[in-house]
Image (cartoon, grey):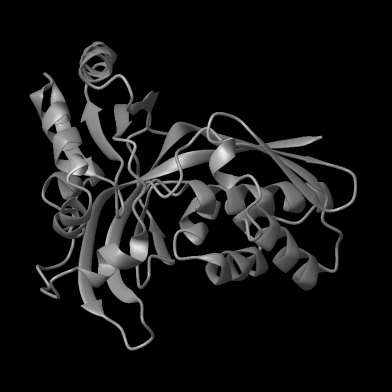
Amino acid sequence: MIVEQAPAKINLALHVRSRRDDGYHEIETLFAFVQDGDELRLADGPPSLAIEGPFAGVLTGEGDNLVTRAAGAYAAVFAKPGGAFTLVKRLPVASGIGGGSADAAAALRALARRDGVSLDDPRLFAIADSLGSDVPACLLGRSALGRGRGEQLEPVDGLTGMPVLLVNPGVAVSTGPVFAAWDGRDRGPIGDGALLGRALLGRNDLEAPARSIAPAIGDALALLLDGAGTRLVRMSGSGATCFALYDWPEDRAAAANAVRAARPGWWCLESVLA
């Protein structure tokens, strides 16, 4: 059996620059990854997908899971069989932290490892690009500046080991309506310099439209901002997950306890940046 982790991604900054004629948007974003997330297992057997874990119920019976799409695309390109996948779904769905994209990237890595395909094979990244805008970044699996739809990647030195707290208020937000509600104003590019400084000077242009769709995002941001020791508080992706970075794990733990006490039904993940 091959086991691949599918870590959550966060957008330290996300600048929307313009609408494109192909229906997508031109963006600049700073991708980072946490150490925790979903888990994907690949065993010999006919192509199949079993789903377990705390968020399995959301995906059970779904006919077009990104894992099966990734396996099908891989088989078409490399002329290799699929396999029996088991997805342990620990990340909330439609939450702005790349859960499905990370799962698809994990499927490509697992199949490549099984078949001796190099993980930097450009054919893998071409498949990833065909599956979704965040899948190439999740396949790369390290901090990067993303341009275009997010698929044009420039690796950057990360913030490995920095404590992070992820909070989701239990609201699923679809990416399409959030982008559609963007006001169309280009507020400028992501700056240069060290990753944390670039993030601090950046923003998430999707926060305002996402909050108009899901006001609970504002509540999550306010709770995180109330905590001591935060270096950066921001919504990730198109929402609704928000995150905070800390210098010290003790501050992260205190913030997590405060969130759980105030909102016991919310999803909370204490982790570190990978």
Q: Would you place residue 260 above or below residue 223 in this image?
A: above
**Observer-nearest of 54 and 46:** 54
**Image point 25% across, 10% down: which residue?**
250
- Location of residue 2 by image quarter: top right
**Observer-nearest of 93 and 234:** 93
| Quadrant into which the N terminus falls | top right
Q: Would you place residue 253 above or below residue 167 in this image?
A: above
Question: x and y percent of residue 83 in the render?
Answer: 83, 50
- Location of residue 200 by image quarter: top left
Q: In the visual, does 84 lie left or right of 202? A: right
**Image point 50% across, 65% down: which residue?**
132
Question: x and y percent of residue 86 in the render?
Answer: 72, 39
**Observer-nearest of 12 and 117:** 12
**Image point 22% across, 78% down: which residue?**
18
**Observer-nearest of 53 and 24:** 53
Question: x and y percent of residue 243 in the render?
Answer: 26, 35
Q: Would you place residue 70 above or below residue 51 in this image?
A: below
Q: Is residue 119 visible?
A: no
**Image point 15% across, 55% down: which residue?**
212
Q: Residue furthest bottom?
A: 21
Q: Is residue 67 visible?
A: yes
Q: In the visual, does 172 lie left or right of 205? A: right
Q: In the visual, does 125 lie left or right of 170? A: right
Q: Would you place residue 118 above or below residue 163 in this image?
A: below
Question: x and y percent of residue 263 in the render?
Answer: 25, 22
